[in-house]
Structure formats: structure tokens, C-alpha cells
Image (cartoon, rainbow, N blue to C red):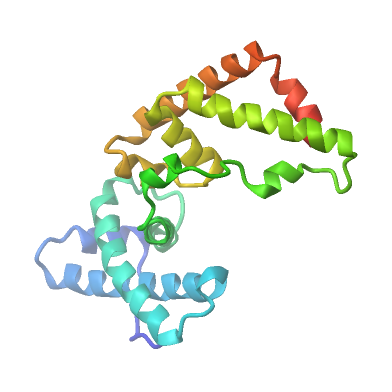
Amino acid sequence: MTTANITDRSNEEWIAALQHKGGAAQSDALADLRQRLQRSIYFYLSQDRSDLRGLAAQELAQMAEDLAQDATLRVMDNLAKFRGESRFTTWATKVAIRLAISDLRRARYKDFSLDELTADGELLPISTRLGASAAPTPEKVAERDDVLEKIELALKEALTERQYQALVAVALKGIPLDVLAERMGTNRNALYKLIHDARRKLKTHLEAEGISTDYMMNLFGN
């Protein structure tokens, strides 16, 4: 991946140039910034993302170019937040990488459907059912299975459908909060409260069944 020569600037020079609306200084600074971010994003995609190892260099370069365009706009929108506590380019790179991570996460879950969470079938993953013990006794296996069945039943009985979907999506399926919030037509704060209330209701329901948090930790942690 090749880039043109990029002008080296101090923090003050970066800010002054980027804020010089409509001038040649701003145009040059934007071009330099986009190239820097594209280079950093490409490095991140090609070196730090094992899930992208199967993509060709040309595909990664195109992704980096597209993400750099969006990242440049994000940096411009957040210029007022730069406090000068680090090099401007370091700060801008962090903004760009966070954007790349967010976009990749969204792409990963683009086909995620809330309806899948209410489908019949085993709710808890096999890894959860196995617990942490390498060789649990038959008695402990039976006890764990009994508790897991009660947990699965509690998830469906104690929670509203919306609470159920949110808790299962985040706690069991690993769906990111921002992706789930968008899919459920809400925001992160409201979703966080929804999940908090769901956990509390689930805990109360299980405790009424004689299943405390400490009991579950001991059962599945040994």
C-alpha cells in the first residue's frame, strides 16, 4: 500500500489548517489526514484482525480507504474534543480505529435477527453446559443440567419478550450494545436499563426457586 508524501505538522498547525475553511491549507491538511488514517486503518485490518486474514490485500486496502473517508469526517466533527494531551495524529488515529471497530462489528451482525432469539431450541451454549471442570462427576453434571433447565425456563417465564431478547442477545449471543440498540429502535442508555431490570427480575425469580448467585458460581466454577 503506497501513499504520497505527507506534511509533518505540530498539533497547533493541524488544528489551524483543518479549521481554515475553504482554503488550500485545509484541503492539503484533509488530504494528509485521510492518507495517515488510511495507512493506520490498513495496518490495523491487516495485522490486528485475525478474522480478516482471508481477505486479499486489495480488499483490505479498499476497506481502509472507505473507512478513512468516514474517519476523516468523524475527526473533523470532533475537533473541539482534542485537548492536546497527545500528538494530534495519535488522537485522530484512535478515533479512526474506534470507528473501524464499530463498523466491522456492525457488518458482522448485519444479518442478526431478534426473531431468532425466540426460536425453539437450546438457549444456553454447550460450553456453558460443560462448566469449568474438566471432568465433573455424573452427579454434578446432572445437577448442572437441572439448574440450566431452570435458568432457561426462568428466562422465558420471568421476563417480558423485550427483556428476554435484550438479555439473551447481549449475555448469551454476544451482540454488541450499539448494534442491538439500533435493531431494537432504542439507545444505549435505555437498553442498559432494560438489561439491568431483566437481570434483576431473573435473579429474583431464580432465588425464589432456591438458586442463588453464589450457588451457581460454586456449581459451575468447580
- The answer to which quarter of the image holds residue 203 is top right
Q: Is residue 61 above or below residue 119?
A: below
Name the residue rendered at 61%, 41% in the picture. 124
- State the residue in front, 131 or 196: 131
- State the residue in front, 35 or 109: 109
Location of residue 72 in the rendering, given as x and y in whole percent from the top left corner? 28, 63
Name the residue rendered at 69%, 43% in the picture. 128
Q: Where is the N terminus found, in terms of image quarters?
A: bottom left
Count of marks, rendered view: 0
Q: Residue furthest left?
A: 22
- The answer to which quarter of the image holds residue 12 is bottom left
Q: Residue furthest front?
A: 120
- State the residue in front, 45 or 155: 155
Tell whether 193 sits left or right of 142.
Answer: left
Q: Residue furthest top?
A: 208
Location of residue 218 in the rendering, given as x and y in whole percent from the top left corner? 81, 28
Q: Is residue 8 visible?
A: no
Location of residue 71 in the rendering, given as x and y in whole percent from the top left corner? 31, 62
Tell whether 30 sits left or right of 131.
Answer: left
Name the residue rendered at 35%, 28% in the picture. 190
Location of residue 136 in the rendering, given as x and y in whole percent from the top left corner? 87, 41
Q: Is residue 201 above or below residue 178?
A: above
Q: Is residue 151 above or below residue 35?
A: above
Q: Is residue 177 visible?
A: yes
Name the residue rendered at 39%, 29% in the picture. 161
Q: Where is the C terminus found, in terms of image quarters?
A: top right
- State the residue in front, 110 or 136: 136
Tell whether 60 sits left or right of 27.
Answer: right
